[in-house]
Image (spheres, rainbow, N blue to C red):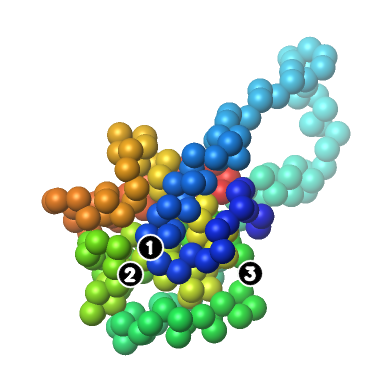
Amino acid sequence: MSSTAPLSPALTDPDTLDREAARLYESAAWERLLAPAPAPAPAPGPASEAWRSLLSVPVDRLVADALDALPAPPPAERPLPGRIGAALPDRLHVWRRIGRPDVRPSVHLAYARRVLEEWGWQNTPYKLRDARGARCVCGALLAAHRLGHGSAATMNEAGAWIMTELRSRGWHGLIGPWNRAPGRTAADALALLDATIHRASVAGR
């Protein structure tokens, strides 16, 4: 999967990821990605007769075309490491990336959601995790990446999708300040990722 904008050298902490996601969100490449697709040109000939062409197409071809139009099935789930794995430094999970294919940003976001749900959510300012292994929203993206679910470019794009969702809700700051805002809860973080996953999926990402 190709990146939509160049990345800075290393995304090693939530603060850096937050800034990179904002940079991508504000780029011309991101505006082009979100721009609506042009309307298809009208089919030639009278529309009322278009159905007749289907009569000469074999049924198995129609079924195959319909199946090809369906979205790809979700990848087979890989269980997250347990509570001890959650508390370990993320660098110890890097080996899990070996041989792993890239995924769409929406899939990466889904794994980040699992990190928050299974390992826990925390809102200490720009801290990757707490003593129990709980993550902030950006920390969950980093953890999903280091566990082998998406490249650094995919992680960065996932962060930009979160920024897009936050902007639609009237939040104009970075992800970190949203994560640690007074009154913020784990349910809020999970709901944000659910909405972002839907937004990215609808866009084909």
Task: Name, please, the residue furthest toward the left.
Answer: 183
Mark 2, Cα crowd under 10 Å, few <14 / some 14-19 / many 20+, is many
Question: Badges 1 and 2: C-beta atoms under 8 Å apart?
Answer: yes
- Element class at badge 3: loop
Going by the image, does 43 lie left or right of 190? right
The answer to whether residue 192 of the structure is visible from this angle is yes
- Residue at far right of view: 56
Please identify, in this view, whether the residue under mark 3 or under mark 1 is nearer the observer: 1
Disc 3 marks a residue whose amino acid type is Pro
The percent position of residue 89, horizontal first and vertical second, equals 38, 82
Q: Residues within 10 Å of mark 3 (few under 14, many from 20)?
A: few
Amino acid type shown at disc 1: Pro
Q: CA distance from mark 1 to mark 2?
A: 6 Å
Query: Against 84, is 141 above or below?
Result: above
- Say which of 196 and 159 sits in front: 159
Q: Quadrant of residue 18?
A: bottom left
Q: Earlier in the sequence, mark 1 or mark 2?
A: 1
Residue 150, position as x, y percentages in the image = 55, 65
Instruction: Tell me the number on the disc at residue 101.
Output: 3
The span from disc 3 to disc 1 (Cα, nearest Å) is 23 Å
Residue matched to label 1: 14
User: Residue 82: x percent and y percent?
Assistant: 34, 83
Camera-side residue: 194 or 49? 194
**Mark 2: which amino acid?**
Leu
For the residues bearing labels 3 and 1, Cβ distance under 8 angstroms = no
Which sits earlier in the primary sequence, circle 3 or circle 2?
A: 3
Q: Find disc 2 in the rendering and name its residue.
A: 128
Tell me which residue sits at (23%, 79%) in the image.
Answer: 131
Can residue 114 be seen by looking at this rendering? no
Q: Quick one: 127 or 140, which is closer to the camera?
A: 127
**As displayed, is residue 116 above or below residue 165?**
below
